[in-house]
């Protein structure tokens, strides 16, 4: 979620999102294939306390807000994530990308081990999350 008012053109405190970051290297992060947003129902996420949840199993991973029925992101592991990623044969410097995940024999790899959970409220930055020339943004990336 952003800290901006709900009228903010790019989504404010009435929108939240969840994303899984995964790929063979940072340049080939396929997060955009496992990313989703949810709009608050007749309110904003800043109007009170909220419960944010994550349910993770060998078959799926999903996030929710306030109730398991209000899912934000649902990702099933019905096929290997490497196949879902559609990664190139090599990265931008020509290094061959190898599917090291295939060695586990599990479709949920790399999410078959402990990983970092990041919870944030975006308040600025120069990574493109706040688009230039939109909604009165007072800086340029």
Image: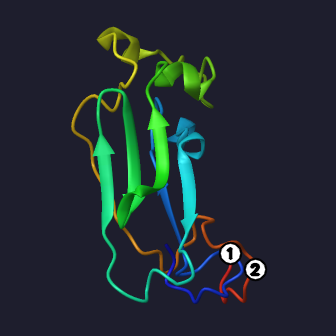
Query: Quick one: which residue is furthest to the left in this view?
Result: 114
Residue occupied by mark 2: 134
Classed neighbour count for the residue bearing mark 2: other residues with Cα under 10 Å, few (<14), some (14–19), many (≥20): few
Camera-nearest residue between 134 and 35? 35
In the displayed structure, would residue 131 be above or below residue 17? below
Marked residue nearer the N-terminal end (2 or 1): 1
Residue at (55%, 19%) from the top-left corner?
Answer: 83
Q: Secondary structure at mark 2?
A: loop
Residue bearing mark 1? 10
Q: Residue at x 72, y 80 (%)?
A: 9
Name above or below for residue 91 compared with residue 12: above
x, y percent for residue 60: 39, 33
* Badge 1 density bin: few <14, some 14–19, many ≥20, Cα 10 Å: some
- Could you tell me how far apart the alpha carbons at marks 2 and 1 are, in whole angstroms? 8 Å
Mark closer to the observer (2, 1):
1
Residue 90, percent from left and from top: 60, 21
Count of marks placed on residues: 2
Residue 22 coordinates in the image, percent (x, y) = 45, 37
């Amino acid at each position: 979620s952003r800290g901006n008012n709900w009228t903010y053109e790019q989504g404010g405190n009435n929108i939240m999102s969840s994303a899984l970051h995964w790929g063979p290297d940072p340049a080939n992060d396929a997060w955009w294939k496992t990313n989703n947003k949810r709009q608050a129902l007749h309110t904003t996420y800043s109007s009170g306390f909220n419960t944010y949840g994550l349910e993770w199993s060998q078959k799926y991973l999903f996030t929710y807000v306030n109730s398991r029925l209000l899912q934000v992101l649902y990702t099933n592991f019905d096929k290997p994530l490497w196949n879902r990623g559609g990664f190139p044969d090599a990265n931008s410097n020509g290094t061959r990308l190898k599917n090291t995940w295939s060695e586990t024999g599990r479709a949920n790899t790399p999410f078959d081990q402990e990983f970092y959970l990041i919870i944030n409220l975006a308040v600025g930055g120069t990574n493109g999350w706040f688009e230039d020339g939109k909604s009165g943004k007072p800086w340029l990336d």
